[in-house]
Amino acid sequence: KYFDYPLKPSNAIFGLGILTTLKILSDYGTEKIKKLFRPAEITSLEDWVVNQFGRAMFNLYFKQYSEKVWGIACSRISAEWVAKRIQGLSLGVAIKNAFFKVSGKGLPTLADNFLYPALGIGRISERLRDAIDTKGHVKTSTRVERLYHSNFKIEGALMKNCDGTYQISGHQFISSIPMPALVKMLEPEAPADVLDAACKLKYRDLVVVAVMINRERVTDQTWIYIPERKIALGRIHEPKNWSEKMAPPGKTLLVAEHFCFEGDNTWSMEDKQLLDVTSQCLAKLGFIKENEVVDGVVVRVPKAYPLLEVGYKEHYGIIRDYLSRFQNLHVIGRSGTFRYLNMDHAIQAGIETAGEILEMKNSARS
């Protein structure tokens, strides 16, 4: 069954059935009444969702999908993640938005449309590279091995590529390197408590499997979320629904996301097996027939999402406070800041960081 997001009353009532719908509304009402007498203590994702949507809705949808995404129990996932991810949303707001569209106006989580480059999101990086290359040079296939510093100022970096290692220097350093890895690159070494905290921050990894289908179009959806545990993949999208140029004429792509931990069975699977598993899941869900798959590719994304476990803030705070002492180090991005940023927020933060650096440069000149 499909359930619309944002919520549509007829879809919810007929999809879930009257009794289940009434149970959801009853549980939500119970939570609202409880809050009048005793404010809920919100620590975990489970606490937050039950408080905002009721126990029935939590068990029906949020529990399975959240545990599939994060690989741990909802009681261990920090409430901060879900509170920011669906900021301002509750069952009451969702219902109001379903009947009165204006009620959800201004809530990013209820957005009806968004902008997308005709040739894919990678065009943003390509255009940035082209602009930088007019006055500088973008080095790819190059790793940062060490960051040299003195008196809380980064002085240079040791780089490594296929030709060997070399050093660079600079005035300002912008890093989207995963926060724990960044700390471990510093030379002289970071204090013991900072290194210890870095070992305790974890990430959730991702395997993306794209299969090309010998068909013009499969769905008319933006994203499709699949909470069931028995289905290996967690989310599907069809890039051609975002831009006609995202697949060859007469063909389309289905992109499936498999949430995992680096080194587990999913991550370690051979590409062919991952393509087969994905094709079988898509066929089982009724999207395609397996013989319609004509090609495919697998991309592994390490440290795709910061894993915000209950209690993570203590370790995060130690690292953040230490890194903030560096005068010319600017930490950005989802992995770099260890914050669950949406893409638009990450882009905005990057623009703001660039503005701050330019402002410092102009101030130094005057």
Image: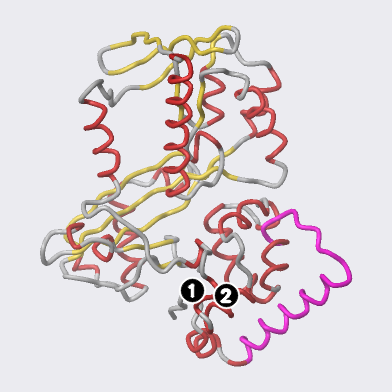
Given residues 264 and 149, the one toward you in this image is 149
Q: Residue at x 47, y 9 (%)?
A: 155
Q: Residue at x 77, y 75 (%)?
A: 32
Q: Residue furthest bottom?
A: 18
Residue 101 against residue 58 in the figure, above or below? below
Given residues 324 and 79, the one toward you in this image is 324
Q: Residue furthest right?
A: 37
Mark 2 residue element: helix
Residue 328 against residue 118 in the figure, above or below? above
Quadrant showing the N terminus: bottom left
Left or right of 192? Residue 355 is left
Residue 170 locus on image (x, y percent): 41, 13
Amino acid type, callout 1? Pro
Residue 206 locus on image (x, y percent): 43, 47
Q: Earlier in the sequence, mark 1 or mark 2?
A: 1
Residue with the mark numbered 1: 6
- Residue 61, quarter of the rendered image: bottom right
Residue 138 locus on image (x, y percent): 27, 24
Asked whether 333 falls inside the magenta stretch, the response is: no
Magenta segment boundaries in residue numbering? 19-46
Residue 341 against residue 278 in the figure, above or below? above
Q: Residue at x 56, y 90 (%)?
A: 17
Label annotation for residue 48 = none
Residue with the mark numbered 2: 94
Amino acid type, callout 2? Ala
Q: Residue furthest left?
A: 249
Q: Are marks 1 and 2 in contact (CB under 8 Å)?
A: yes
